Image: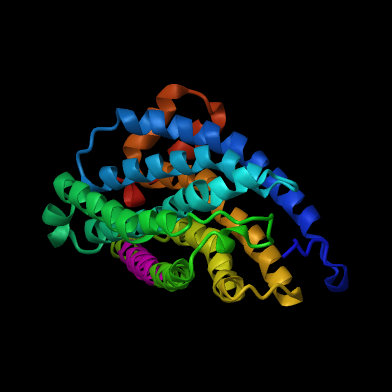
């Protein structure tokens, strides 16, 4: 089937949408590369003395890998992109892109649990804070996602379509591959909602604990309390802004994608899915903010670089120890 772009009856021009998305990815790539190369250099200098630092270093590596995939993602979205590049993206680069995105979510959930045990449940800190536990958990998470999601998806997306279809990735899947893809989408939505609940619960408890500490100390600094709440909920804010819109649109889109229902509703969902997926990728620029807010050692190493001048000096001085890492 030929590509339905432009769908004049629907008032949508998918070729224009692809061009805009391509530009957005390339615009995102430059600051993302700068931020994540810097973050990778700093995290390389950090000693893994706690599970938190292990999660942080893994998150930095995930963001850097995702950043390096962005040019391939952008190129495959270009109007008139070669079929070979699109097929490569379907089978490999896009699958790795999703691997990074969901590992990013999982690591954010693990970081939230670590902060919860450190601040709210100090009695569980000795076991839960140990770097060996962090390494074991990270290895298990990567192994599970690679073996259950990434590798099977690559294997089941190996067909050779004869023409440049509107849904090339689906055309490259067997019937089993399409059913597996649908099951993976359900699993990924479950991952999103579980981690959303974990992050929301952890940081709500952390905020209450910190505010109680302020009250017990007799502090009346309302401005300070508001700043602490904002810092505590930064992970939840980044998670919602980046990932919630995509998961709202992805499931209904995949239902029509699998059934190859190319119509106006499909086109509208495809546009929404494309823009919200790009929004999800912006987390590679927002995550460094999390590193700075939550990890004191990361802030100190960044300060040593002296690349952010007066802005960073002021910001670092304002961040308190209440939400800092080890």
- The image shows residue 3, relative to residue 260, as above or below, that is above
Q: Look at 40% across and 44% down and name the residue there.
A: 62
Asked if the stretch drawn in magenta spans residue 119, the answer is: no
Place of residue 223 in the rendered image (x, y in percent of width and height, measured from the top left)? 50, 57
Magenta stretch, main secondary structure class: helix
- Residue 69 visible in the shown view: yes
Where's the N terminus, which quadrant?
bottom right
- Magenta span has 206? yes
Which quarter of the rendered picture does the C terminus lie within? top left
Q: Is residue 321 left or right of residue 222?
A: left
Percent from the top left, x then y, of residue 303?
A: 43, 28
Give the extent of the magenta segment.
194-212
The part of the image, by quadrant, that contains residue 15 is bottom right
Q: Is residue 224 visible?
A: no
Instruction: Say which of 146 and 201 sits in front.
Output: 146
Name the residue nearer the viewer: 308 or 102: 102
Query: Where residue 135 appears, x then y in whole percent?
Result: 21, 46
Colour setup of the view: rainbow
């Amino acid at each position: 089937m030929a590509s339905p772009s432009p769908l004049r009856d629907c008032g949508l021009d998918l070729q224009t949408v692809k061009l805009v998305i391509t530009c957005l990815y390339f615009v995102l790539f430059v600051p993302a590369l700068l931020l994540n190369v810097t973050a990778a250099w700093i995290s390389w200098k950090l000693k893994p003395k706690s599970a938190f630092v292990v999660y942080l270093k893994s998150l930095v590596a995930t963001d850097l890998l995702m950043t390096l995939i962005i040019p391939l993602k952008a190129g495959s979205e270009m109007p008139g992109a070669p079929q070979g590049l699109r097929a490569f993206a379907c089978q490999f680069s896009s699958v790795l892109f999703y691997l990074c995105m969901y590992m990013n979510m999982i690591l954010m959930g693990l970081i939230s649990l670590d902060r919860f045990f450190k601040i709210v449940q100090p009695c569980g800190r000795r076991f839960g804070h140990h770097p060996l536990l962090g390494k074991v958990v990270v290895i298990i998470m990567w192994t599970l996602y690679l073996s259950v999601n990434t590798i099977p998806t690559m294997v089941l997306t190996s067909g050779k379509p004869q023409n440049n279809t509107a849904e090339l990735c689906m055309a490259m899947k067997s019937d089993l591959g399409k059913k597996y893809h649908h099951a993976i989408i359900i699993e990924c939505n479950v991952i999103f909602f579980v981690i959303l609940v974990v992050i929301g619960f952890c940081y709500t408890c952390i905020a209450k604990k910190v505010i109680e500490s302020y009250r017990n100390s007799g502090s009346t600094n309302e401005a300070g309390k508001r700043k602490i709440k904002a810092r505590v909920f930064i992970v939840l804010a980044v998670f919602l802004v980046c990932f919630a819109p995509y998961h709202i649109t992805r499931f209904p889109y995949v239902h029509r994608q699998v059934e190859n229902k190319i119509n106006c509703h499909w086109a509208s969902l495809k546009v929404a899915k494309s823009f919200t997926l790009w929004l999800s990728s912006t987390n590679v620029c927002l995550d460094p903010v999390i590193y700075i807010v939550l990890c004191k050692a990361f802030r100190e190493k960044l300060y040593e670089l002296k690349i952010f001048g007066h802005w960073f000096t002021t910001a670092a001085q304002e961040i308190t120890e209440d939400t800092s890492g080890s």
